[in-house]
Amino acid sequence: MELLVSTLCGSLVGFSLGLIGGGGSILAVPLLIYVAGVRDPHVAIGTSALAVGVNALGNFAGHARRGNVFWRQAALFAVTGIAGAALGSTLGKLIDGKKLLMLFALAMVAVGVAMLRPRALGRGGAAQFNRAAGMRLAILGVATGAASGFFGIGGGFLIVPALMFGGDLPILGAIGSSLLSVGTFGITTAANYALSGMIDWPIAGAFIVGGLAGGFAGIAAATRLGARRERLQRIFAAVLFAVAAYMMIRTARSP
């Protein structure tokens, strides 16, 4: 039953990722804790990072086949961000579980606010890869990698605008390129947590299977819904606010 519930939770996260893009994976940790029954917040974060990382790399392959990846920008951002993810996940493991959940709830609020705001555009130029762009991408890669590793989230809601600003990538190219970083940050975070025995492997496997299936359904729904996705993003942001409030209340009341 636990594995079945984990599969269903994974499908819900995968569906939200396919439907609205960045930000959907942040539901993984609260679902693992409050629905799938993972009691240790650190285990939930490590397990979530693995599942989200694997699912992101699967979706990245699809975007690569469609030519939606700017390889040099994507590779630089991902490689520099690995160091940030390793540092962030190391710090996350040192934080008390109760405090970490409270911080995670605050991060959910930040994601919700970001989803309500109009998506940031590039700086107005054509996609480029020169020294200045490389420096911007490297700095932003380390920063977003650290945030992703600390909270065990994909970080797509940060990575997409960072790629658009740092390398003047178009929105579709930024989304496709961002998945390489989401995958590498997640795998890096999961590897760090695995070294401390903080991954529930059976649940992670079930979550990945459900996430892949849900992702296909979410992408299909996004294609049909078209412009109404913006309305769905606002609804999803409201869900994040509600879940964040629930986490804060539960965490404050726990011994």
Image: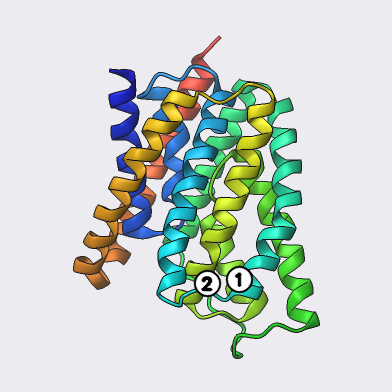
Q: Earlier in the sequence, mark 2 or mark 1?
A: 1
- How much space separates mark 2 and mark 1, taking CA atoms? 6 Å
Label 1 sits on residue: 163
Front-lying residue, 26 or 78: 78
Label 2 sits on residue: 174
User: Which amino acid, by three-letter code, is at mark 1?
Assistant: Leu
Secondary structure at badge 2 equals: helix
Query: Which of the 4 image quadrants contains residue 97?
Result: top right
- How crowded pointer 1 is (Cα within 10 Å; few <14, some 14-19, many 20+) is rated as many
Taking the view exactly as shown, the residue that stands out farthest to the left is 224
**Image position of 85 with respect to 199: above or below:** below
User: Which amino acid, by three-letter code, is at mark 2?
Assistant: Ala
**Residue in the picture at 29% in, 46% down:** 213
Is residue 233 visible from the viewing direction of this image? Answer: no
Secondary structure at badge 1 equals: helix
Q: Position of residue 183 (x, y in %)?
A: 55, 52
